[in-house]
């Protein structure tokens, strides 16, 4: 760990362990084995190809155990074979040849990887990895963030807070409403991610079933391809070159990037609110905020989240821009890029956990919120001038501008102004009763 090149495999490895079995080299090998095994079973037991004898139930179970009960030594053996082949997918094929010899089904060896290009295996393997990573890890953690935002929005729904537009005092809101804003934005992206489709193709060297048709001209290979991909619980990609177009990957990466942008925005806002004293942070025993300033309680969780979301989005942006682009029927530039999906997911996951930790340490400083509101009675210029407009008072906006802009305004200033207004008495009473802390509109209801 101390010599790991990436902090995800070193310093932060324990925080992203859920992704390791999915996106590691071993995880990719496991997924490739799964596709190769299922293709062999499909050819023998579903298509019943002439020359490919049927696999018995015990043999099918034995083959599936290779990926269901995947062992590290399987990955190590494949990597040993790769040293000779200098080809990662061919090494998986040779590994399975050895397995068939152990099962005494050597006659089936020609049907391992039958009529496949490496990309037939890889695109399906990555689709399965993406599906597992997104559904079982990323969405689960985003759901935890959403639950925390909902909790905070409900807890602080009525706590008034001065809003800031352009960094200046603005119409009050509530703490709960601001958390709800974040949650509503994130939920929309979450729902879109839940509906993501994962595409796969298996159609040969350039997507036309050329070798398939020559070897078995009577087989309906288009239908067979669809049936196999859907058997893997993926969406069938009918048209492709040598590679699956990767458009669905770009859609998912862009969607995830949008979710990350929302949380990056949140991290910066929380950092700012903490610096303003609107939130306190629960002190964790033993933690140190500064090597020289003992008093410091730094917003490190939000800083960590912001930094890692930036890293994740840099990768996600490159993925979505690069992967759908491949010269003519294919080039190899996607291969090395795809191997880094786990990094983007890892930095995102690390950020979600940091953000969740930071949100869990927040305590609203209601005294500071009340003080800021009480020091900004000029905020009531908006409701006063709006009521004046309702009753047709001329130059309502200009009157309040002259009263409040660039001048010191307090409760007495506002009430003296309202008292002299020529508007109905009930309207005047409503304005006289207003304070910056009660001028929150429908925020609590929203």
Image (cartoon, rainbow, N blue to C red):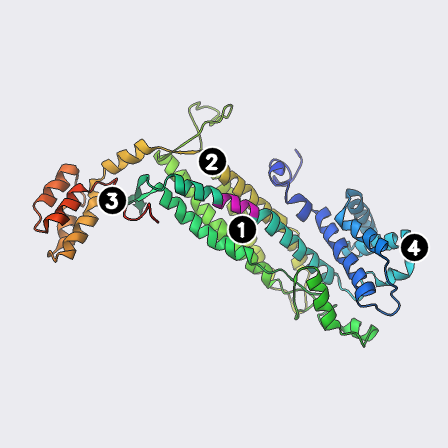
Compared to residue 417, the image places residue 200 above or below, namely: below
* Residue carrying label 4: 104
Q: Quadrant of the N terminus?
A: top right
Give the left or right position of residue 325, taking residue 358 as reference: right
Q: CA distance from mark 1 to mark 3?
A: 41 Å
Tag 4: Cα neighbours inside 10 Å, few (<14), some, or many (≥20)?
few
Mark nearer the N terminus (4 vs 1): 4
Give the left or right position of residue 51, taking residue 435 as reference: right
* Residue carrying label 2: 360
**What are the residue bounds of the magenta stretch?**
140-146
Numbered circle sitting on residue 439: 3
Which type of secondary structure does the marked residue at label 4 adopt?
A: loop
Compared to residue 194, the image places residue 303 above or below, namely: above
Mark nearer the N terminus (4 vs 2): 4
Quadrant of the rendered structure where residue 280 is?
top left
Q: CA distance from mark 4 to mark 2?
A: 58 Å
């Amino acid at each position: 760990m101390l010599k790991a090149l990436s902090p995800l495999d070193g310093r932060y490895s324990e925080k992203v362990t859920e992704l390791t079995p999915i996106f590691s080299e071993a995880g990719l090998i496991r997924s490739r084995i799964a596709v190769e095994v299922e293709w062999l079973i499909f050819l023998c037991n579903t298509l019943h190809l002439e020359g490919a004898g049927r696999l018995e139930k015990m043999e099918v179970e034995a083959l599936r155990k290779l990926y269901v009960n995947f062992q590290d030594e399987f990955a190590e053996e494949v990597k040993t074979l790769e040293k000779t082949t200098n080809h990662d997918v061919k090494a998986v094929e040779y590994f399975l040849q050895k397995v068939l010899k152990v099962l005494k089904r050597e006659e089936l060896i020609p049907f391992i990887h039958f009529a496949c290009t490496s990309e037939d295996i890889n695109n399906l393997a990555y689709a399965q990895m993406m599906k597992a990573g997104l559904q079982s890890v990323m969405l689960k953690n985003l759901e935890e963030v959403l639950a925390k935002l909902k909790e905070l929005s409900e807890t602080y729904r009525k706590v008034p807070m001065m809003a800031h537009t352009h960094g200046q005092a603005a119409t009050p809101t509530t703490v709960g409403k601001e958390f709800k804003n974040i949650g509503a934005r994130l939920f929309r992206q979450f729902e879109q991610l839940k509906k993501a489709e994962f595409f796969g193709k298996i159609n040969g060297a350039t997507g036309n079933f050329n070798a398939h048709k020559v070897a078995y001209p009577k087989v309906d290979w288009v239908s067979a391809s669809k049936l196999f991909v859907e058997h893997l619980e993926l969406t069938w990609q009918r048209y492709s070159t040598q590679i699956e177009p990767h458009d669905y990957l770009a859609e998912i990466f862009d969607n995830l990037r949008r979710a990350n942008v929302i949380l990056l925005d949140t991290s910066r806002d929380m950092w700012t609110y903490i610096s303003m004293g609107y939130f306190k942070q629960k002190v964790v025993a033993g933690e140190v905020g500064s090597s020289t300033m003992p008093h410091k309680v730094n917003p490190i969780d939000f800083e960590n989240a912001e930094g890692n979301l930036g890293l994740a989005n840099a990768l996600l942006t490159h993925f979505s821009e690069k992967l759908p682009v491949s010269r003519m029927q294919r080039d190899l530039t996607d291969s090395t890029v795809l191997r880094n999906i786990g990094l983007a997911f890892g930095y995102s996951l690390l950020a979600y956990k940091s953000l969740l930790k930071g949100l869990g340490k927040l305590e609203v400083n209601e005294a500071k919120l009340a003080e800021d509101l009480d020091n900004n009675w000029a905020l009531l210029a908006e409701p006063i001038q709006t009521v004046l407009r309702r009753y047709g008072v001329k130059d309502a906006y200009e009157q309040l501008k002259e009263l409040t802009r660039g001048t010191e305004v307090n409760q007495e200033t506002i009430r003296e102004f309202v008292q002299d207004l020529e508007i109905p008495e009930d309207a005047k009473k409503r304005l006289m009763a207003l304070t910056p802390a009660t001028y929150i509109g429908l925020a609590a209801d929203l």
